Every structure is written in structure tokens, then in C-alpha cells.
């Protein structure tokens, strides 16, 4: 080899070495997976200790103390009927600006949490006039809360609580009472596009741990033999869309039937997957979570308890202890709602600038 060729090859090797070094440095910024554990950029196990920011970017009727208006669209209808569409738009702008603020994020950090899960409605990420256009206030709202969490040193998991067409078929996914997402190609494509845009927005942000693709898919009152085989193929489609723009973050897959059923899953199909279950209202003991521990051990992947709560402090404490004994991270539900849990707020005044009562128990029949 001539001296000139030696110099050329030497430069090529240097460039390749620098490129690999740059990639390793870039990837090392992010929370990732290592076998059964979620780990920090320096490889240390990270036990997620979180709280859900429920009722913010997807309102739920029971959290408003409504009796029949249980889904976001029905709640919006109630507000429109009470104060008209123009005032309702101002109300929701004020609501989203104030329900979760930087003070809340600061409070959660001081309370000892290290992460938050942010449930959202897909409708905030598309145009109200044309749902194929990926325009909406949701992007800026996520930017803002992620920025606050970055300042406080809290990690973020983004959760599509309501997907196009509906993944659950119940009030919580703002659907028409049926999981149309699994039968409608347009809804599936829109779901992929929204996740792809969100992932592209946060692909380089280490504050974000990852993406919880579909909250509580396929309610128990639908035919599991028909719907369950459709879940993992849809997950594969969404993951492929995300990986086209973001190879850095963890992707969380929830089981069927309110996130409880992991039998729908085959072997992991991506190197950065974690599997998330929700479990409410049960007798706290090892047998209650053993199937998820077994799944973790069999497939050598992390599992995460993404939702539970709505119970006594004693019950939550015992469940948290059980999870930590099994090295499973947790995220309880919710951070706040009317008259309950971590932070309380008073019911609003009886009048909204006109003779319409919205809070007296005798007339609050929405």
C-alpha cells in the first residue's frame, strides 16, 4: 500500500470511528431498556415513580362530578349548552392553561415523583375542520409540559388516551361506543401519522422516556376472539411509523381488555419495547401481578404499571410496595380531580356570568 493510500484509509477509519462515537454519545442521552429493566443513560436501573395528569388533555365526566356526560365530546356538549360555543372555546383555553401549570410540575417533583404520564385526546392534534390535517393546540401543550418537566428533572411518558376511531369502545377513548380503530384503515393511518409527528417533535429530547401507544385497548364487553388478534399488528404498524423518525425512545405497549391481557403478545418485535398493564380494585398480593412478572422473565423485557389508584391511601401504599418489591415501576391515577386525591380544588361558583347553575348538586344531572 502506498503512503497516499495509507493516509486515505487512515482518514476513512477516523471518520467511521468518529461517526460511531457520535452515535453512541447521542444514544447515551436517553432512558432506554436493558433486558428486564428500564435504565438511565449511564446504565443504572430506573424505577419509574409517576403520576398521571388525567383530566387535563382528555376530560372525563366522573372527574367533573357529572352523572351522564362521561366522554369528552359529551362534556363539550354540556359546556356548549351552558354558555355557547364562543364562551366554551374561551373556557377550554383557560381550563388547559390552568389545570396543569408549572407550579403543579414543581409540586410533583417536591413530592418525590420522578415521572409523569400525560394522557391526551388525538382531537387536540388535528384540525377541527379537517381531521386529516395535523394541526392543533396539542403540540404546543405537550411542548410546554415537557419543558416544565425538563426544568424540574421529571421524566415524561406520552399517552394516546383517545385514538382516532376509538381503541377501547368506551367513554375514555371519546369514541362512539365501539373500537372502530381496528376496522378502519383511515383511522389507523391517522393514528400512525399523529404518533409520527409527535415522535419527530421529541426524537432528540431525553426528558421524554417514551410513547404509550394506545390506552386500554379493547374493552371487556367486545368479542376478544375477534378484536385481540388485531392489536399487535396495529402496534407493529404504529411502531414502524415512529421508528422512521425516532429510534431513541422506549415504546410502551398495553395489553388488551383494559391493558390487563398480555396473552395477545408474541415475542418483542423492537429492541426498545416495554409492556404496560393497568390494575385496579383487587386484593393486593403477589398472585395478582405474577402473570406480568412471568411475562417479563420469559421475554426479558421491562413491564410497567401505567395506571391504578382510585382507592384508599393504605391500599395504594401496599400496592406500591408490592410493585417495588418486584422491581416494577408505577404511575398512579390521577394527580387531581374534583374533591379527591393529591391536590384538591373547590367546585366553581354557581354562576358563570349568567343565570345558569352548574354546580348545585340538585341540578348537576349532566
Image (spheres, rainbow, N blue to C red):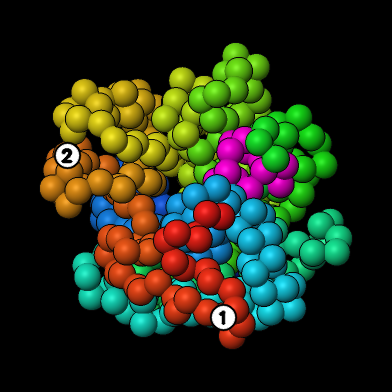
Q: Residue at x 25, y 31 (%)?
A: 282
**Cα distance between the residues tagged 2 and 1:** 46 Å
Q: Can I make out residue 81 in this image?
A: yes
Answer above or below: position of 217 versus 17: above
Is the N terminus in the top left, top right, bottom left or bottom right quadrant? bottom right
Q: Is residue 121 magenta?
A: no
**Which residue is label 2 attached to?**
322
Percent across and percent down for residue 324 are 18, 45
Instruction: Give, as a single range, the part of the protein colored magenta.
Output: 164-175
Secondary-structure class at tag 2: helix
Of residues 22 and 157, the one drawn nearer to the viewer in this rendering: 157
Left or right: residue 192 versus residue 292 is right
**Which residue is label 1 attached to?**
352
Left or right: residue 332 versus residue 8 is left
Q: Residue at x 47, y 34 (%)?
A: 258
Percent across and percent down for residue 240 are 67, 43
> Quarter of the image holding residue 16?
bottom right
Amino acid at each position: 500500500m502506498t503512503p497516499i493510500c495509507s493516509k486515505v484509509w487512515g482518514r476513512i477509519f477516523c471518520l467511521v470511528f468518529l461517526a460511531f462515537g457520535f452515535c453512541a454519545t447521542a444514544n447515551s442521552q436517553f432512558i432506554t431498556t436493558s433486558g428486564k429493566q428500564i435504565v438511565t443513560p449511564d446504565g443504572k436501573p430506573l424505577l419509574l415513580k409517576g403520576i398521571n395528569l388525567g383530566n387535563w388533555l382528555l376530560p372525563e365526566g366522573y372527574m367533573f362530578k357529572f352523572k351522564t356526560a362521561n366522554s369528552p365530546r359529551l362534556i363539550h356538549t354540556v359546556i356548549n349548552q351552558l354558555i355557547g360555543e364562543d364562551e366554551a372555546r374561551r373556557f377550554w383555553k383557560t381550563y388547559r392553561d390552568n389545570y396543569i401549570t408549572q407550579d403543579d410540575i414543581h409540586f410533583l417533583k417536591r413530592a418525590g415523583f420522578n415521572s409523569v404520564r400525560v394522557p391526551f385526546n388525538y382531537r387536540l392534534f388535528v384540525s377541527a375542520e379537517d381531521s386529516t390535517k395535523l394541526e392543533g393546540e396539542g403540540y404546543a401543550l405537550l411542548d410546554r409540559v415537557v419543558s416544565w418537566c425538563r426544568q424540574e428533572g421529571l421524566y415524561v411518558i406520552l399517552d394516546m388516551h383517545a385514538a382516532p376511531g376509538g381503541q377501547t369502545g368506551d367513554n375514555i377513548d371519546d369514541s362512539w361506543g365501539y373500537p372502530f380503530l381496528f376496522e378502519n384503515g383511515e383511522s389507523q393511518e391517522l393514528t400512525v401519522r399523529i404518533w409520527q409527528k409527535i415522535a419527530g417533535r421529541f426524537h432528540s429530547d431525553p426528558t421524554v422516556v417514551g410513547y404509550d401507544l394506545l390506552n386500554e385497548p379493547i374493552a371487556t364487553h367486545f368479542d376478544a376472539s375477534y378484536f385481540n388478534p388485531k392489536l399487535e399488528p396495529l402496534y407493529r404498524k404504529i411502531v414502524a411509523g415512529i421508528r422512521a423518525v425516532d429510534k431513541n425512545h422506549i415504546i410502551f405497549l398495553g395489553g388488551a381488555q383494559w391493558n390487563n391481557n398480555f396473552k395477545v403478545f408474541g415475542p418483542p418485535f423492537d429492541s426498545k419495547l416495554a409492556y404496560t398493564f393497568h390494575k385496579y380494585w383487587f386484593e393486593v398480593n403477589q398472585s395478582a401481578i405474577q402473570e406480568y412478572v412471568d411475562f417479563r422473565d420469559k421475554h426479558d423485557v421491562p413491564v410497567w404499571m401505567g395506571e391504578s389508584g382510585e382507592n384508599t391511601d393504605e391500599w395504594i401504599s401496599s400496592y406500591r410496595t408490592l410493585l417495588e418489591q418486584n422491581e416494577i415501576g408505577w404511575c398512579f391515577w390521577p394527580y387531581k380531580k374534583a374533591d379527591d386525591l393529591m391536590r384538591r380544588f373547590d367546585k366553581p361558583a354557581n354562576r358563570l356570568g349568567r343565570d345558569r347553575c352548574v354546580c348545585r348538586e340538585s341540578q348537576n344531572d349532566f
